[in-house]
Image (tube, rainbow, N blue to C red):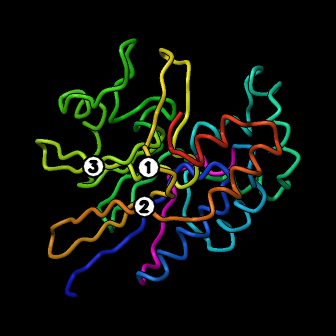
Amino acid sequence: MINQVKIAIIADIHGNSWALEAVLEDIKKRGITNIVNLGDSLTGPLDPRGTAEILQLHKIISIKGNQDRLILKPTKEFLESNTYTYVKEQLSSDDLLWLDQQSETLSLNEEDIYLCHGTPTSDEAHLLEEVTQHGVFLRHSEEIEKDVKDIKQSVICCAHSHVPRTVYLPTGQIVLNPGSVGMPAYIDDLPYPHHMESGNPHANYVVLTKNEGQWTVEQIAVPYNWNEAAARAIENGRDDWAKWIKLGRV
């Protein structure tokens, strides 16, 4: 088609190489060659080494997520976790260098797309969700606009919550979260105890297509062998991860 842009957006793989391979195969079947990754690629009790190999082999443009940053500069709590020890033992010095060289945000000016993991200024904050003591809710457009006021691109891609969403702002900008490739649910304590759930075990990603100035957003859910990924989590003492992977629920 004339003046067409087509790009796949992936995020929050969390070392789930089984899910990543299924997503890349689905992307290949669609004839898409442009892929970008919004971070949190390797952390988890699954297959960080295999995931790093796949991403580097395919030369996928990637940015850092908060969990990627913690691999390189761990907090005391993370440093003492079994998951951190497992991930660090799996990764080579070349893998760590590849991770360290990634930027925290990225502007794809030719495609008119902006990439961040959380918000443009924080990899730990949610751009589309508000976490409260009463639950997790979609943020008001005015609040989202405040966080992206300096972003000129017409499409803003974020991750971090693992929940697939597409939001249209009054400015005309589209803000989307492709969901998680490899971790469809999780529990967190900050800023309040809460859980994030996609509601299904599929590997999620987005296909963005621009035809004659108009964007189409396709939220894709891909089946894969999530039982195998869950079994690896159980082997590494993370029954909670196994449940999240198999159900997309906490």
Residue 186 location (% of width, % of height): 55, 34
Identify which residue, 247 or 212, lies in the foreground: 247
Residue 14 location (% of width, % of height): 63, 48
| Mark 3 element type | strand
First in residue order: circle 3 vs circle 1: 3
Identify which residue, 193 or 117, lies in the foreground: 193
The span picked out in magenta is 31-43
Which numbered dot is residue 225? none
Which numbered dot is residue 179? 1
Per the image, is 24 magenta? no
| Mark 2 or mark 1, whichever is nearer to me | 2
Q: Would you place residue 75 above or below residue 111 in this image?
A: above
| Residue type, mark 3 in image | Thr
By secondary structure, the bulk of the magenta-drawn segment is best described as loop
| Residue at numbered disc 3 | 166
| Mark 2 element type | strand
Which numbered dot is residue 221? 2
| Residue type, mark 1 in image | Gly
How far is mark 3 from mark 1, CA to CA?
Answer: 10 Å
Considering the image in quadrants, where does the C terminus appear?
Answer: top right
How far is mark 2 from mark 1, CA to CA?
Answer: 9 Å
Residue 18 location (% of width, % of height): 65, 63
Q: Residues within 10 Å of mark 1 (few under 14, many from 20)?
A: many
Identify which residue, 57 or 105, lies in the foreground: 57
Which residue is at 61% across, 69% downward? 21
Per the image, is 40 magenta? yes
| Residue type, mark 2 in image | Ala
First in residue order: circle 3 vs circle 2: 3
Q: Is 79 situated left or right of 150 in this image? A: right
How far is mark 3 from mark 2, CA to CA?
Answer: 15 Å
Residue 119: quarter of image = top left
Q: Is 19 situated left or right of 228 in this image? A: left
